[in-house]
Image (cartoon, rainbow, N blue to C red):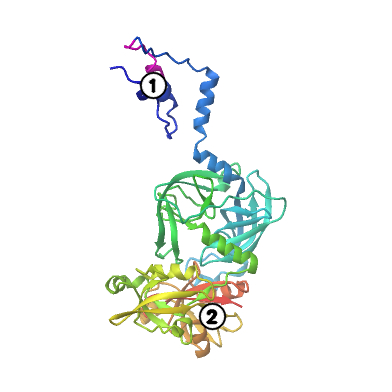
Amino acid sequence: MTPSPTACRPARAHRRGMVAFAVAVLGACGGGSADSQNPVTTPPRPTAAAATAQVDATRRTAIVQAVERVSPAVVSISVSARRRRAESPFDFFFIPQARDQVVQGFGTGFIVRPDGIVVTNQHVVAGAESVVVTLRDGTELPATVVGEDPTTDIAVLRVEGRQFATAPVGRSTDLLTGEWVVALGNPYSYLLGNSEPTVTAGVVSATGRNILPSRDQSGLYLDMIQTDAAINPGNSGGPLVNALGEVVGVNSSIFSQSGGSIGLGFAIPIERALRVADEIVRNGRVRRAWTGVEVAGADAMGEWKSQGGVVVRSVAPGGPGARAGLGPSAVLVEANGRPLRNFLDWEAVKLDLHVGDSVLLGVREGNRTVTRRLVSGDLPTVTAERIRLRQDIDLVTVTPQIRAERRLRAEQGALVVRISPAIAEQVGVAEGDVIVAINRAPVTAAEEVREFLDGLRTGTAFRLYLERGGRYTYTDLVRR
């Protein structure tokens, strides 16, 4: 049977590379007709120029146009930092300062304001002595670090000069699992011959991912966008872009045993990144909210399932949690309408709180569930001068002998052997705690705690990760 004109009409395929197929169909449908009263005429064959133009049009996919829209605002970041190399905790006492090594780091960022405000990951610029930003056209500009927020892994840089191209911003809240996204960055940029950003494409694998801390990464990544777009070393801080050419996330981390991409990449939602960046630009720091509530952490997975919520372990005296009427053993089941399945859900709620925000908590106390209103406050403050290692607090480096004697889980860290009551109450650290990490950097020796506090910018919030009684917890503080 002779196909009808409707059947012969090629579909408006969204897949690229269908032009040859469509041309073949047109040719096949152009034969004679069995019905002489309804002759089918053969369409004229396109000229070579028209065919080329048709193919060129199909090459300009949504991904190509998205890249064209965003790439002028993508920058490569080169960082020089001075770090001490140590193979064991004892090396920190024997390697002289003169042997500190200058190490080079690389990452990506994107410009969000015409006056040269660049957003990137905090871990890209951590400890930086100098930062150089390279524009798409190869122009190199010195950059200053406006501020950092290790908790959200966001940092802000500033470059001086002309009116810069900026990246269009979209929303992560309406992302669809399975939709196309593009990651732009500069993986292994020091090996490449030009400054053009590398483009990888994939889909949104999932949204709202909470990532448990691991041995190599102590920080928490919350409400993350998961993608299979390839993200490799050097991509950190680059934009994750939707098919409309709008930035929806900041590429931040990958799961990998080899260090390369295996299709498990994660990006920080753009709304959080820009909120943090705005606070840093306006105030030089992020004013992080404090709840004064410690909950069961990653080591209490069985408790989450059996209790159906997050178990409160302790409440700071006089803190926001205490004023809300919370006590140990209470179970948090909901926060502002969001179910709390585990401690990462609670962390995600806290991460986006401003100081003074109210949180309506669903709390199970015994056999009843009640509603409590918690109003967040400012983080406890600490100064390097007030924590004097010899007068207020004594720390010792964890050794195999100390680990065995104290039955510690941590293989390395700084053990608190004495702390004054006033400091203990203020900063939430107790005698017998082991400081295992500060922000995202593992602590391998007691002296590193002092070095960290001495080098911290005033007003910077930071997080101490602690082993306490065989379990891991943390306390948030801010440097004054």
Left or right of 320 in this view: 384: right
* Depth check, front residue: 157 or 410: 157
- Residue ID for mark 2: 380
Residue furthest top as drawn: 36
Mark 1, residues whose alpha carbon is within 10 Å: few (<14), some, or many (≥20)? some
Q: Position of residue 452 (x, y in %)?
A: 57, 73
- Residue ID for mark 1: 25
* Depth check, front residue: 114 or 129: 114
Q: Which label is found at residue 333?
A: none
Question: Is residue 56 inside the magenta stretch?
Answer: no
Mark 2, residues whose alpha carbon is within 10 Å: few (<14), some, or many (≥20)? many
The amino acid beneath tag 1 is Val
Most frequent secondary structure within the magenta stretch: loop
Q: Position of residue 280 (x, y in %)?
A: 61, 66
Q: Residue at x 44, y 81 (%)?
A: 321
Secondary structure of the residue carrying tag 2 is loop
Q: Residue at x 52, y 39 (%)?
A: 64
Which region of the structure is painted magenta? 26-35
Q: Name the quadrant of the C terminus.
A: bottom right
Residue furthest bottom as drawn: 421
Q: Is residue 294 above or below residue 111?
A: below
Cα distance between the residues tagged 1 and 2 = 72 Å
Answer with the quarter of the image where residue 102 lies: bottom right
Q: Position of residue 381 (x, y in %)?
A: 56, 80
* Depth check, front residue: 254 or 11: 11
Secondary structure of the residue carrying tag 1 is helix
Q: Is residue 101 visible in this depiction of the protein?
A: no
State which mark lies toward you, 1 or 2.
Answer: 1
Residue furthest front as drawn: 37
